[in-house]
Image (cartoon, rainbow, N blue to C red):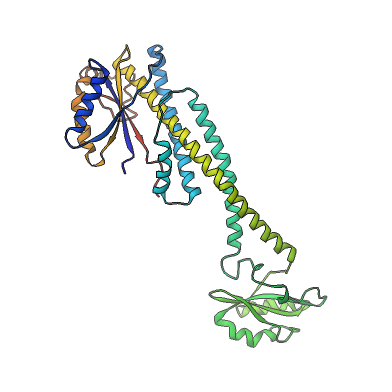
Amino acid sequence: KMTEFWLISAPGEKTCQQTWEKLHAATTKNNNLSTNSKFNIPDLKVGTLDVLVGLSDELAKLDAFVEGVVKKVAQYMADVLEDSKDKVQENLLANGGKVLLTLFSFIFKGVNQIDNDLKARASAYNNLKGNLQNLERKNAGSLLTRSLADVVKKEDFVLDSEYLVTLLVVVPKLNYNDWVKQYETLAEMVVPRSSNVLFEDQDSYLCNVTLFRKAVDDFKHKAREYKFMVRDFQYNEEEMKADKEEMNRLSTDKKKQFGPLVRWLKVNFSEAFIAWIHVKALRVFVESVLRYGLPVNFQAMLLQPNKKTMKKLREVLYDLYKHLDSSAAAIIDATMDIPGLNLSQQEYYPYVYYKIDCNLLEFK
């Protein structure tokens, strides 16, 4: 789907309506080159030309800032929804696309607020998500590293004994027969037949073994030579309960935050998007006055180009408006700075032109 719009303006002919009709006819008569609509900008109070030239530069900066925030909100929405990008794009533009053009000042203030709120909310939610992922990661992965809390039971251990202690050992499946043969003699004072398989993953078994405390170091050392890895683990019911509770708490918190966060993102996406279109409207107004002069007399039009025929559309627009350049052409030869002709900043056309690119998500 084409999500690029061209916002253009041309001077009023006898009337602005005529300018509109001419454009509409030219772009629709040979197989629709674009879908068009009038883009009405209220008459704004025009100050001096100096003020407009200054405003033109400020608006360019504001435009870039607001577009950045719109894209940040969209991108974060995609992260939070963990959804397909096309779906998120649709979801957003359904809200943002119906844009009302009532101009207001305070755009910067409003959008700046959205930017700051987004930072705060995103950081809170990302922290939560990160902590939860860390806990989940603890309970996944190989037996050498994963948390063992949820795979062992109280009865697998000799607890509260002054002399005896139970160790947990990760035994590669390939070496399991060796373990059965060897473990009782790896060190002095291993309790015979005290080893059982408690759990397994793809490559290894988790076994327990009980021995005298003073033989532990010796046992660990010997076990390593046979590729039996003793895990550093103390059975502690309190701690395990706390871990489980923490996991449930984070999971509940994440669910609780998700709904309000998505709602906030949708609402503020709309706000930022509308602000962005307002900035474009202001830019068209300022550039049109700078180019076409006073009294204010121009028609702004919004075109949604047909993707396949964009080149053709450019040619049709050029034919319609190249006469506007006869005056500009003479000036362009002179190497002076002309208000409204920011040649360095974007492609130049004989008509005022701004692109509104609604491909808000980087499709990675």
- Residue 272 in picture, x, y percent from top left: 46, 33
127 in relation to 20, above or below: below
Q: Is residue 332 visible?
A: no
**Closer to the camera in the image, 37 or 314:** 37
Q: Quadrant of residue 94?
A: top left
User: Which residue corresponds to the image point at 19% horizontal and 25% vertical from the top-left?
Assistant: 320
User: Which residue corresponds to the image point at 65% horizontal and 76% vertical from the top-left?
Assistant: 169
Q: Quadrant of residue 6?
A: top left
Total numbered labels:
0
- Residue 186 in picture, x, y percent from top left: 69, 83
Q: Outermost residue toward the bottom? A: 181
87 in relation to 273, above or below: below
Q: Is residue 211 visible?
A: yes
- Residue 312 in picture, x, y percent from top left: 19, 35
**Closer to the camera in the image, 42 or 211:** 42
User: Which residue corresponds to the image point at 29% horizontal and 16% vertical from the top-left?
Assistant: 292
**Closer to the camera in the image, 113 or 166:** 113
**Closer to the camera in the image, 100 or 155:** 100
| Quadrant of the drawing holding the N terminus | top left
- Residue 139 in picture, x, y percent from top left: 60, 64
89 in relation to 248, above or below: above
Q: Classify residue 160 as left or right of residue 244.
A: right
238 in relation to 229, above or below: above
Q: Classify residue 1 as left or right of residue 187.
A: left
Q: Classify residue 41 as left or right of residue 76.
A: left
